Image (spheres, grey):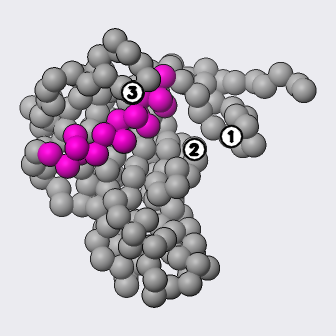
Amino acid sequence: MAEQVLTRVDNAVVGMIDIVSSTSQIMGNPRDDQAVRAVKMLRIIQVLQREIQAFAIPVSFTGDGLLFYVAAQSDRRIIDRMAILAGLVRAELNDQPLLPMRIGFSRGTIFSGQVGPGPNIIGVPVVEVSRLMAEKEMFDSGTTNSRVATILATEDTLETGVTLNLWGSLVMKDWQKIEPPWEPRGLPGYLVSIYRYI
């Protein structure tokens, strides 16, 4: 087997979107047959991918969302785009209720390339953001200024994003620190400060 070539990307901002309730409202909807459910989910992912491609690189479908990354040296306004994603999905699926989203961000060095059967990314930020997305209570607690998306980011990601204008006009005071520091599952002793966009 030939050795896989991976491209190193430093200071990448890794993001993951989880479409809340898509499993029960779309994939588990008893009114639709399985093919109709699959097409609806495909349409949602196509909308997300189309919008995300304007500022980031979509990587893979996560089962009910999308994994992507942004090369942090780029000047891109992530939050400006995140705020409208749920509305775009609802417009595409006009017979569906509003499907809120959980969005998580991590930052660091990743490696991109052929991983398994297709292109993907590997690195601690990928593990970190996937573990963060599983922490539903961190998303659900507290108040946010959006009914359609709750956004969490690691402190390192947040500070980098403010410096590089990834968050548009947002500054640190637009984010609420979650206490105590978070320890990602499977990474004992690896404590991370998490912030919620408020």
Residue at 50% across, 42% down: 68
Q: Earlier in the sequence, mark 3 or mark 2?
A: 2
**Which quadrant is the C terminus positioned in?**
top left
Residue at 72% across, 43% down: 118
* Relative to 172, residue 40 above or below: below
- Dot 1: element: strand
What's the amino acid at mark 2? Val
- Dot 2: element: strand
Q: Which residues are magenta?
A: 124-141
What's the amino acid at mark 1? Pro
Q: Nearer the viewer, mark 3 or mark 1?
A: 3
Relative placement, left or right, of 174 versus 91 is left
Q: Which residue is mark 1?
A: 119
Q: Which residue is mark 3?
A: 185
Cβ atoms at labels 3 and 2 below 8 Å apart: no
* Relative to 46, residue 196 above or below: above
Per the model, the C-alpha gap separating discs 1 and 2 is: 7 Å
Of residues 127 and 176, the one drawn nearer to the viewer in this rendering: 127
Residue at 22% across, 40% down: 138
**x then y, percent, for residue 97:** 30, 77
**Which quadrant is the N terminus positioned in?**
top right
- Dot 3: element: loop
Q: Which residue is mark 2?
A: 59
What's the amino acid at mark 3? Arg
Q: Nearer the viewer, mark 3 or mark 2?
A: 3
Locate residue 147: give its quadrant: bottom left
Cβ atoms at labels 1 and 2 below 8 Å apart: yes
Per the model, the C-alpha gap separating discs 3 and 1 is: 25 Å
**x then y, percent, for residue 175:** 15, 35
Q: Earlier in the sequence, mark 3 or mark 1?
A: 1
**x then y, percent, for residue 186:** 44, 23
